[in-house]
Image (cartoon, rainbow, N blue to C red):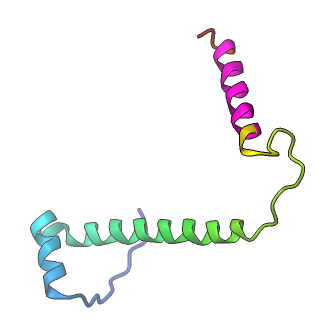
């Protein structure tokens, strides 16, 4: 079992009323924990995305010189995969 900690949480009454209406007051904590976990996951992904965007672009990637070349590369890859699966 995960270690749990009791905490004091202050929120607008209207928000808590909406949560209670949706899931009931006995499942409020479970809902808020799930919502917090989802938001943390999204914020971590957003942070990682920002870090990756700072990386210098790869240069001289064969088949990726132009948008048309990328489209051809993707098409050829899909056709090859289709052949392997005998579609």
Q: Classify 86 as above or below 72.
A: above
Residue furthest out toward the top:
86
Is residue 46 magenta-colored?
no
Please state which of residues 30 and 42 is positioned toward the viewer in this rendering. Answer: 42
Work out whether residue 25 can be spotted: no
Q: Classify 7 as above or below 28.
A: below
Q: x, y percentage for residue 27? A: 19, 66
Q: x, y percentage for residue 65? A: 82, 45
Please state which of residues 8 and 44 is positioned toward the viewer in this rendering. Answer: 44
Quarter of the image with the N terminus in it: bottom left
Residue stretch rendered in magenta on the structure: 69-83
Picture quadrant where residue 48 is located: bottom right
Q: Residue at x 33, y 83 (%)?
A: 6
Work out whether residue 33 can be spotted: yes
Q: Residue at x 58, y 10 (%)?
A: 87
Please state which of residues 26 and 87 is positioned toward the viewer in this rendering. Answer: 87
Q: Which residue is drawn at 29% across and 72% down?
A: 32
Q: x, y percentage for residue 39? A: 42, 70
Is residue 80 magenta-colored?
yes
Q: x, y percentage for residue 67? A: 71, 44
Please identify the dominant SS of the magenta region.
helix
Q: Which residue is drawn at 88% across and 54% down?
A: 59
């Amino acid at each position: 079992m995960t270690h749990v900690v009791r905490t004091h949480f202050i929120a607008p009454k209207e928000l808590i009323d909406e949560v209670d209406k949706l899931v009931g007051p006995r499942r409020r904590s479970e809902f808020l924990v799930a919502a917090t976990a989802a938001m943390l996951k999204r914020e971590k992904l957003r942070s990682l995305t920002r870090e990756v965007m700072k990386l210098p672009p790869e240069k001289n990637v064969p088949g990726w010189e132009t948008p048309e070349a990328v489209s051809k590369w993707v098409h050829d890859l899909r056709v090859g995969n289709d052949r392997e699966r005998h579609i």
